[in-house]
Amino acid sequence: MSTYSPSDIEAKWQAAWADAETFKAVRSDDKPKYYVLEMFPYPSGNLHMGHVRNYTMGDVIARYKLSTGHNVLHPMGWDAFGMPAENAAMATGIHPKEYTYGNIAHMKSQMRPLGLSLDWSREFATCDPEYYGQQQALFIDFLEKGLIYRKKAVVNWDPIDMTVLANEQVIDGKGWRSGAEVERRELVQWFFKISDYSDELLTALDNLDNWPAKVKLMQSNWIGKSRGLQFGFSMIDGPEGHDRVDVYTTRPDTLNGASFVGISPDHPLAKQLEADNPEIAAFCAECRKGGTTAEAVEKAEKLGLDTGLRVRHPFDNAWELPVYIANFILMDYGTGAIFGCPAHDQRDFEFASKYDLPIIPVFAEVGATDVNLTEAFVPGRTDKVTYLKGFAGETDQNGDEAVEAAVDFCEANGVGQGVTKFRLRDWGLSRQRYWGCPIPIIHCDSCGAVPEAKENLPIRLPDDVSFDIPGNPLDRHPTWRDCTCPKCGAAAQRETDTMDTFVDSSWYYARFTSPGATTPVDADEAAYWMNVDQYIGGIEHAILHLLYSRFFARAMNMTGHLPEAASEPFNALFTQGMVTHEIYQTKGADGRPVYHFPSDVTDGKLADGTDVDIIPSAKMSKSKKNVVDPDDILATFGADTARWFVLSDSPPERDVEWTASGAEATHKHLARVWRIANDIATLEGGDASQDADLERAMHKAIQDVTNGVESFGFNAAIAKLYGFTGALSKSKASAATKREAARVLAQLMSPMTPHLSEEIWTLLGGEGLVTTAPWPVADESKLVEDTVTMPVQINGKRKAEIAVAADADKASVEALAMADQKVLRALDGTTPKKIIVVPGRIVNIVI
RNA sequence: GCCGGUGUGGCGGAAUGGUAGACGCAGGGGAUUCAAAAUCCCCCGUUGGUGACAACGUGCCGGUUCGAGUCCGGCCACCGGUACCA
């Protein structure tokens, strides 16, 4: 008998699959198609354990579907544009292209030994001109259909490096390289009109039955449909052109509690006041400091400045309210102006307290006639309250009812209009960076922004660029930038902004159906393969990537690139947890954190004795230096061990803290399976009277493992496989039955450990490849047992167990329970008040 | 701040509202061996008890239920997202 030697068998079977083209996806009408896709990786340079976990999960599904008679499409590619390549260029001088393709080659060489059932013939990288050229064609089509437009938007501006910063590059409000305080600055940028689809993207969530509820809920909250009132406060002696301030509110019922009007520092009125009032200008400049993220804006100290302007309350001409400029009001949402009701909004309450503004209660707990507020009173929208200063609807009503009544009242009295708004903002796609898909637009003095002619696509990125100066090298590349207008032929300039990398990942799933097509997708191929039947990826993509992809599929349908049926592209979604690892950090001379590799840290200290701060359990990321790569495990134990191990320990949707202890135990288990299979291969005779027990165990294992795989319960499925292996090992059943059971074991293991399974399958006389052999089916009739064990509880606490016939009726179960010695002892003569018998489950005696 | 999630032995975790801790890791004991490796068997939540057994126990506080890790309300801690990280 040979010992278990993964390095030999894994290479052998991978070659066999390649020779047979087992995983090549070809359209076929005699089998149902199944498209399984894992979110493609960013080529960071090294495959890490998170990738192994993600791709192994997808592989289990893909291989299982192959065994159950599906025509499987399981492709892989690279999300290859992005900032890290430019950062590497700045740090080391290596060109982003060289960096990216080098990383892809290395990661692919790490990925291939895993034995994933991928159709590598469909591989592409988003930085391939063949891909991004088609993306440029999509841009032009979207633009033509009005799905893309230009407007001003704020970016993080580093005033020292004179460059735009990504949110990630802003640390504590300062530029990551220069350390300068970041400012918010407006630039003209391109936008996808995703807001046109707000309502549809929201309502269509209801049909996504095979998506996690949490993802749908997050998307729903993100889209943020709200019903409210839009109305104007008339201005008293306002500046030229500003006779009113338009406000959107979701709580018009609190209008009688208004104590101020607030406008965004980016509101047109604020800008006009800023022009000739130095105090206001200074305040607005202060408000524009810091990053653009919602988190930074919301967490910043709430600041306001009284502009001196006054507006009239819509219900009372004599009631005047002050107009404040406030740093927490976003120009992007609603009208960029609000009215503050401090009594019923905590933020307004704090603002009013700080600036000594009145706090006027509008409603109180039901029945109350007065309130004394030490903080804002904010009941749930469905909780009934008593209105003290209501003006519409009942005195006692809940928030939702009151809002509707208030909207009706205001509309009837000409005060404003009920409107439905969405929180979802249009998607800004312009990036002031090199390593992305060039926006195919030419700026002509006479024709304006003109799309490039499609026959000139792809607009390739120039290779001769340098990164020695901060900023986008395309801006200072005259021979690339200068061109002629496709419309009038005059001298013109290319747009030097590139696209957000989320654009690249918003349609790659469609491109995989026809990666060589000379249009974005081939209609027939897309019609056959779409939708993705099972999409698998990290929960961190719950909102942006998945929402953008849902929008893109709709936009591609509108522009004729995808069929109507594919406008919701992912039939089922599974979000797996992350593989995390401790972060080791020290503080650098400038106070910024410095990260250290796990290999450089021993017992919480660096080699020079410096104490290291240990941050537990953070997402693996290259910049934090806490990435563990799979090379060691693969080299020592092989792919099957790595695959089994990443699936075995934790539920797939949960985060796992990486620890390598246990990989060796997995290897021992696989070696044991191999040994058992070899023993069985040469086994003769045996005790046929034991066959039924082994068969029952086998059919139970088939049922449990099949259920486990179908429900992403891989860890539970593996636990059952341990149990079945033990039963098989101990069984004295006949040789033929044991051989059959061992072949079934190999099959059940094959999605997780395909190489070992092939080896065992062949050893035990299985026909062809186990990979393509039909999945075993559990025989229900062999699962039935004659007797079951039932626990007996007294007042919910387990006191005894009784063995009863599987088909026993309630009365006889009750009689058995009441006759049990332990039960009698525990009852100690007490007469039960009630006895609950749940057949096949439990007996509970209530005393 | 806001939105979403998670919390169970020394560790990873299991458990359609029905025996809490399956399975695995680590640990302890034993068999085999000249010895070791490998392998096989047993024990392994806490406290008390020689033991049979008893009490307690699923982040904290409260509730619903014959019965709660699971459902509901309120907290705490951690993780993800927060529109230019991917």
Image: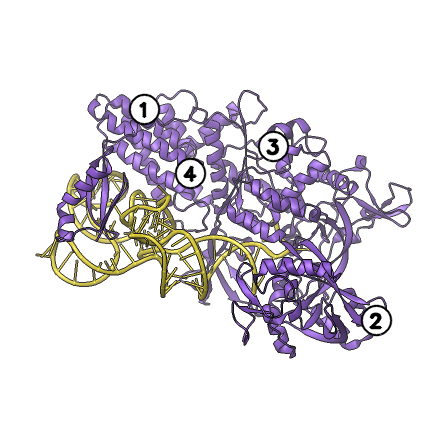
The colour assigned to chain B within the rendered structure: yellow
Classify residue A173 by image quadrant.
bottom right
For the residue carrying disc 3, how many other residues have a C-alpha within 10 Å: few (<14), some (14-19), or many (20+)?
many
- The earlier-in-sequence mark between 4 and 2 is 2
Q: CA distance from mark 3 to mark 2?
A: 57 Å
Whether residue A254 is situated above or below residue B69 in the rendered picture: below
The answer to whether A320 appears left or right of B54 in the picture is right
Q: Chain of mark 1?
A: A
Q: Position of residue A357 (x, y in %)?
A: 65, 77
| Disc 1 and disc 4 in contact, CB within 8 angstroms | no
**Foreground residue, A764 or A152?**
A152
What kind of residue is marked 1?
Glu
- The earlier-in-sequence mark between 1 and 3 is 3
Of the numbered discs in the image, which one, if any, rests on residue A740?
A: 1
Tell me the SS state at disc 2.
loop
**Label 1 vs label 3, nearer the camera:** 3
The residue beneath circle 2 is A239
Q: Position of residue A94 (x, y in %)?
A: 66, 50
For the residue carrying disc 4, how many other residues have a C-alpha within 10 Å: few (<14), some (14-19), or many (20+)?
many
**Foreground residue, A818 or B32?**
A818
- The earlier-in-sequence mark between 3 and 2 is 2
The residue beneath circle 3 is A530
The colour assigned to chain A within the rendered structure: purple
Respond whether the residues carrying marks 1 and 4 are from the same subunit. yes
The residue beneath circle 4 is A638
Of the numbered discs in the image, which one, if any, rests on residue A730?
A: none
Q: CA distance from mark 2 to mark 1?
A: 89 Å
Residue occupying the point 71% across, 54% down:
A467
